[in-house]
Amino acid sequence: MAGLGRGRGRGKGYMSFSIEAVGIGKGENLPPAILQPTPLFPPMEHKPVPLVMGEEAEYMLALKQEFRGNMKTLPFYVRPAVSKKDVERYSDKYQNSEPSDNTIEWNPDWKRLPKELRIRVKKPLKENTSLSVETPVDPKPSKKTRVDKEEIIHKLEVGITLEEEVTSDEEEGEKKKQEEEQQDGEEEYDEEEFEEETDYIMSYFDNGEEFGGDSDDNMDEAIY
Amino acid sequence: MTAQEVRLCGLLLQEHFGEVVERIGTHLLRGGAQNLRTIANETNTPLDLVKKSLCVLVQHGACEFRSGRRGPGSPVEYRASCERVLRVLRYPRYIYTAKTLYGDTGELIVEEVLQRGHMTMSNTVKTVADRLTHNMEEGRSMEYSEVVSAFSKLVETHFLQRCPPVAEVGTAATSATPATPGTPAAPASTAPPTAESNPDCYKLPHVTLIGRGKRRRSSDDSEEQRGGKKAKMDSESCGDEGIYWQVNFERFHQHFRDQAIISAVASKMDQTSSEIVRTMLRMSEVTTTQTAAYTQPLSANEVFRSLPPNYSISRPILDQYLSLLVDDPMEFVGKSGDSGGGMYVVNLQRALANLARATLESVVQERFGSRSARIFRLLLRKRHLEQKQVEDFAMIPAKEAKDMLYTLLSENLVQLQEIPKTPDHAPSRTFYLYTVNQLPTARLLLQHCYKTVANLIERRLFETKENKRLLEKSQRIEAILASLQASGAEPEQLTEVEEMITAPERQQLEALRHHINKKKNPENHIVGFFMNLFVNYGGK
């Protein structure tokens, strides 16, 4: 077909098919060839139809916005742990930290998920009752972390009976149940350590960020 | 999974689940089935975040997993589904439909299940009862039994279904018993089980839920804690652990399809004929499969008996209406026999195809003008036409017809078909015919819709970011106003606070709100919906 075109194309340029068939007569004024991509926002000859807005549409719009807002508060909205670029502050220890990467804030049914996706479930600090924390994922790193935790527990000397439980448990061997109890013990241990170390109520701490916010109520100063 | 679809899915995931899930999700959509390590390496995300995101995606049904293809020892593979993510666009419509059918309780049930992906019945009932109680006046609360009855109605009409049982997949460690007793702990079957394959799909569990909704008090922490403990004990005693319910999207789509057909009939003919069609569709709800081309044949006697009582028309008039419907060129209703006073079917597929065609025609009309629309309609009806024939049939002067045809051709709405006369395809001896292929054109329009929605979302995000300062200021003002009003302030203080926003700012704010709210053009959405239905149900 390319061979057929050659030798026939004279004048304005040739195409691989006969242009009479599509209706371009001989010698007719064709619009000039466009040698660049079409503009990003081409001018519209026909204005679009106005939007259909009725009661139904308004309601659905409100539903959509509410849904979006709700999704942001649910635990499904995954926020990566942001590392603080600022200087380490004393108040960090007593403030609610951002969710760390290796916990999950809701409790899925682990039977419906593959085993490799299991992550530790984070429990809120309020519940001081017995926590059922899931085991961490891979057996290999958990052994290492267990060893580390054992060392830490050994190093810190706080008279808690849990420590005795822990040591007695580790003597028995590596069974999942003991792992869980140890995790249990460690979690409770951490909280109790916090609570014992300070004389202040945990929720009291005021780091001064709200300072200056009350000035909105005071109308005497000019607001820019 | 076109580029436009993937882009739109990414934006939707970002809005609803955050950037991390968006990254993982788009990677899965683009790359097909992958295992955990590949995803973590290729997206440069820490493993724990990947795990979290995958949990979220699986929870919401956007991602499926199964054991690897290379045999039982290979790692688990995850596959994301574009279609499922795109359904997020229709969530408000599902919720609104549930509201119209089953009231506020139904609406809240569907909303909760959509927000969480899948939930147990007891969980849903409690959450919805609490929410309803929260909105009621002081002293009144919602009974669980009312919520349970709404839930069971939704299940009976198949709007909610049980999640398909999941066979145990994963490492060779001791596996928990799979949900279906009796099957050995074997690796998953080749195809993931669908919800419909479970015979108990629509069976309600035997759970006794007695109680009332709790009103959430923000001041009583201790009471909440006690209440929380009590709730925990309650959930343990409910018997439906492991039975999760999800929204049955196909059923909703069926409902929308029926509504579309009924409203088309109502606008083309009159209210009574639409009522007749509605009756016919209602009668065949349970007997028709989802992808059926037409409903089961119904006799005119049955239709007459099942008509709603306030539409009392006599038998001969019903027959006249039915024959009118059959003769209509839109082919909504067809006659399949003469027994029982005439056997009639609703032609679902043809009706959808015709509706899609009408939508295509109107799109061309709005974008290119009514003369181009005339050419387009001509080509739809006459299938293949030469250039000269187009000019003659459309009664448009040659030059303009040429121009319009080339515009349509450049937009890919019209195609050129070559029919050679000689085996060497010589251009001078070939017919060139213009034609319109309905199905590919509908797909093209659908992709345009997706692209438009994605553009609108991006524009909305951009505008929100640009004007963040203003939006935050107005939010603060509203909060201050509300608190002042609550504490009984004087009107002067209120006006003073309102004047904190200057007039031009206020105008700007109004315009901005207007724009932001109008994004995600619902009309666009309806067009997209039709095209989707048409493409999925297989047009001509």
Image (tube, grey):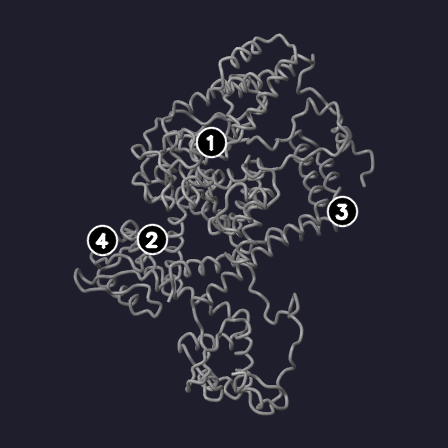
Q: Spatial distance from mark 2 to mark 3, Cα to Cα?
A: 57 Å
Q: Nearer the viewer, residue B512 or B534?
A: B534
Q: Nearer the viewer, mark 1 or mark 3?
A: 1
Say the numbered circle drawn on residue B338: none
Residue B388 sits above or below residue B113 on the image: below
Under tag 2, what secondary structure? loop
Residue A163 sits above or below residue A55 on the image: above
User: Toward which corner of the image does residue B246 lie, by quadrant?
Assistant: top left
Q: x and y percent of residue B297 in the render?
A: 24, 58
Q: x and y percent of residue A78 in the render?
A: 58, 38
Under tag 4, what secondary structure? helix
Which label's residue is closer to the chain start, 2 or 4? 2
Q: Spatial distance from mark 1 to mark 3, Cα to Cα?
A: 42 Å
| Drawn side of residue B4 relative to residue B76, left or right | right
Q: Which residue is mark 1?
A: B127
Q: Which residue is mark 3?
A: B502
Q: Are marks 1 and 3 on the same chain?
A: yes
Residue B5 sits above or below residue B34 on the image: below
Q: Which residue is mark 4?
A: B305
| Drawn side of residue B118 relative to residue B503, left or right | left
Under tag 1, what secondary structure? helix
Q: Spatial distance from mark 3 to mark 4, Cα to Cα?
A: 66 Å
Under tag 3, what secondary structure? loop
Say the numbered circle drawn on residue B290: 2
Q: Nearer the viewer, residue B157 or B405?
A: B405
Q: Nearer the viewer, mark 2 or mark 1?
A: 2
Q: Nearer the viewer, mark 2 or mark 3?
A: 2
Q: x and y percent of residue B179 in the render?
A: 36, 33
